[in-house]
Image (cartoon, grey):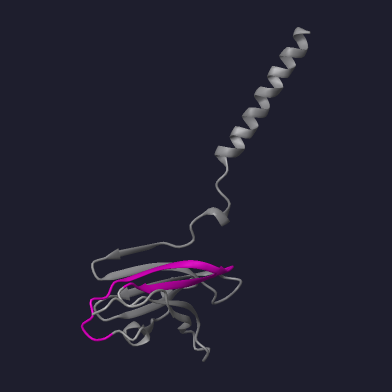
Amino acid sequence: MRYAVCILIASSGMLLGVVGTLMFANPLPDALHASASNDRYQDYIMCTGAVAVNPRAPTDGVWMLDYRSGKLQGTVIDRTVGKIAGWSEVDLVTEFNIPPKTDVHFMMTTGTIAQGQAALYVAEVTSGKFGVYTMGPAPDGGGGIIIRRHDLTTFRAAKPQ
């Protein structure tokens, strides 16, 4: 009887050791890691997210928003040479139909919409406008990138002026 209890205790200890090792030694699966990040400084916001330039070679995209000019810029990093592949630009003042000298408050973040492709979500809280954008290869095949708007809507009525 004592022999069976000792075997049970030893087996339980080994099983708990294996489970503990698996839980704490293995990193989280890629699906659980954050795939994008963002930061802001004064009148600038920067976000990153995947861009599907080549399905076999995922690459990172960088979005920059300049409050003062109302310009959204985007680029991708050419992994083969480690250089920026040029910038594409969208005038958000025109896109969102923002009157001149309006005190704007932009927010933006990225999210994954397909494997290897992020979308950028931009909100301007004064006007209540919300846009969805992606980056991809330019249609001319010259190696540049283009920013595409997929949707532009209003999430609430604009504040009275």
Q: Position of residue 110 (x, y in %)?
A: 45, 67
Q: Position of residue 58 (x, y in %)?
A: 55, 69
In the rendered image, the vertical position of residue 20 relative to residue 33, given as above or below: above
Looking at this view, name the residue that lies furthest to the left: 101
Q: What stretch of residues is rendered in magenta?
A: 99-125
Which picture quadrant has residue 66? Answer: bottom left
Q: Residue at x 24, y 78 (%)?
A: 68
Looking at this view, name the residue that lies furthest to the bottom: 140
Q: Is residue 107 magenta?
A: yes
Horizontal side, residue 63 vs residue 50: left or right: left
Q: Of 30 and 78, which appears nearest the observer?
A: 30
Which picture quadrant has residue 94? Answer: bottom left
Q: Is residue 118 magenta?
A: yes
Q: Residue at x 63, y 34 (%)?
A: 19
Q: Of 66 and 158, which appears nearest the observer?
A: 158
Q: Residue at x 60, y 73 (%)?
A: 55
Horizontal side, residue 161 vs residue 142: left or right: left
Q: Residue at x 28, y 70 (%)?
A: 44
In the rendered image, the vertical position of residue 89 relative to residue 105, given as above or below: below
Split into 4 quadrants, where in the image is the C terminus?
A: bottom left
Q: Of 12 and 159, which appears nearest the observer?
A: 159
Horizontal side, residue 13 vs residue 42: left or right: right
Q: Could you tell me if residue 78 is visible in this image?
A: no
